[in-house]
Amino acid sequence: MVNHNRGLLIVISGPSGAGKGTICKELLEKNDNLFISVSATTRNPRAGEVDGVNYYFLDKDSFIQKIEAGDFLEHAEVYGNYYGTPKSKVEEMLLSGKDVILEIDIQGALKVKENSQEGIFVFILPPSMEELKKRIIKRGSETEESLMTRFKSAYQEINYVSTYNYAVVNDEVHEAVKKIESILTAERCRVDRIKENILDSKEGLIHEQLYD
């Protein structure tokens, strides 16, 4: 039987401090067929970040050249820096049957949604805005000004939750991961994703009945 199983494209977004990165890390550790797309950015690397692992760090001119060449699945400007998802690697992994996570901002997610019918869009919510503020402060990497900018943005970003397919509250990471795994299991069972396999199975069954 021909394998029609294209990988799943999972788009994960949410406000800064909601815990998207922690959730994605645990998902990757628990699922061998799940990969995360490495984004490109013009922002400076943070302590411990490695080029090609955490991000592809590009200067602004190089990034703009890639935009003009159509090399990004999506791109957006966030907090004064550009971010983008390299198109070719994502498509290569999906075609090979691998599931791919895009951990991207809401602007980028909306652009992917405009251009793709196959994405599974999951919005990560904090248990409360007070908890979100604590998580951002705990990072210790924000100035008072940038903290307020991110917190105000979080209020605006949560308004976009209705444009996503699923919403998961990240109160406890392991539970949030379980919920996303359940979403992926359900998506793999959707008839419109597996109809070719169903038809192949049906034809095989009919053939067996006729010639048994």
Image (cartoon, helix red, strand yellow):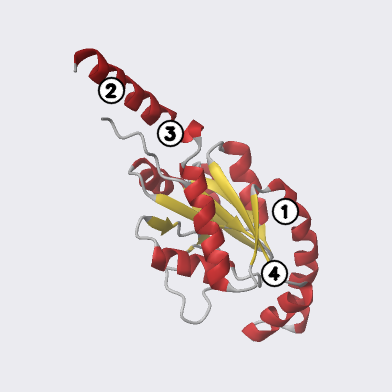
Q: Residue furthest top?
A: 210
Q: Earlier in the sequence, mark 2 or mark 4?
A: 4
Label 1 to label 3: alpha-carbon separation: 28 Å
The residue located at (46%, 64%) in the rendering is 27
Which mark is in front, 1 or 3? 3
Amino acid type, mark 2: Gly
The residue located at (53%, 65%) in the rendering is 177
Residue bearing the label numbered 3: 194
SS assignment at label 2: helix
Label 4 to label 3: alpha-carbon separation: 34 Å
Name the image quarter holding residue 82: bottom right
Q: How many residues crowd around disc 1 within 10 Å: few (fewer than 14), some, or many (20 or more)?
A: some
Q: How many residues crowd around disc 2 within 10 Å: few (fewer than 14), some, or many (20 or more)?
A: few
Residue bearing the label numbered 2: 204
User: In the picture, which quadrant includes the C terminus?
Assistant: top left
Label 4 to label 1: alpha-carbon separation: 12 Å
SS assignment at label 1: helix
Residue 69's place in the image compared with 4, above or below, is: below
